Each structure stands twice: as C-alpha cells, then as structure tokens.
C-alpha cells in the first residue's frame, strides 16, 4: 500500500495504491484518487490537521 499527494494541473490530489505481489512482482493494483476535503461540522471536534496541510472545513 502506498499513499501520496500528486499534483495535476497545479492542483494537489491525494492518491492511495493497494498492490498485490507474487514472486517479487506486482500482479494487481487498485488506485484511489480524491481531492482534499475538510471534516464536516459534526466531526470537526474529532479531527485534527495534519502537519503542513491547510484544508478548509467542509
């Protein structure tokens, strides 16, 4: 599994890849992409910002 932030047309996007390995090779990969989003109001008290990231609330 890998997690990263990629920039596409100057806009950051979050990516997660889940990979299955066999015999030292990737045999299957699923990727998920999402734009940055803030916590909804009902969950704001439970959320805390990650260092170096400024994301507005939802």
Image (cartoon, helix red, strand yellow):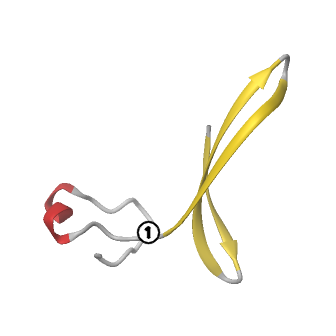
Quarter of the view holding residue 4: bottom right
Q: Quadrant of residue 23?
A: top right
Image height of 34 relative to 28, above or below? below
* Residue found at x 14% / y 61%: 45
Name the image quarter holding the C terminus. bottom left
Q: Position of residue 56 (x, y in %)?
A: 33, 78
Residue with the most extreme bottom position: 10
Count up the numbered dots.
1
Foreground residue, 11 or 30?
30
Is 42 drawn above or below residue 55 in the view shown? above
At 17% from the left edge and 71% from the top edge, which residue is drawn? 41
Horizontal side of residue 9 vs 48, given as left or right: right
Q: Residue at x 84, y 21 (%)?
A: 24
Taking the view exactly as shown, the residue that stands out farthest to the top is: 23
Q: Position of residue 15 (x, y in %)?
A: 60, 57
Residue 11 picture quarter? bottom right
Element class at badge 1: loop
Q: Residue 42 in the image: x percent, y percent?
A: 14, 65
Q: Along the horizontal axis of the image, is 53 left or right of 58? A: right
- Mark 1 is surrounded, within 10 Å at the Cα level, by few (under 14), some (14 to 19) or many (20 or more) other residues, namely few
Location of the N terminus (image quadrant): top right
* Residue displayed at 65% across by 50% down: 31
Check disc 1 and report the residue beneath it. Answer: 53
């Amino acid at each position: 599994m890998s997690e990263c932030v990629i920039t596409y047309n100057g806009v950051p996007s979050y990516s997660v890849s889940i990979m299955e390995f066999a015999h030292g090779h990737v045999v299957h990969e699923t990727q998920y992409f999402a734009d940055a989003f803030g916590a909804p109001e009902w969950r704001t008290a439970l959320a805390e910002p990650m260092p170096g990231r400024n994301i507005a609330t939802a």
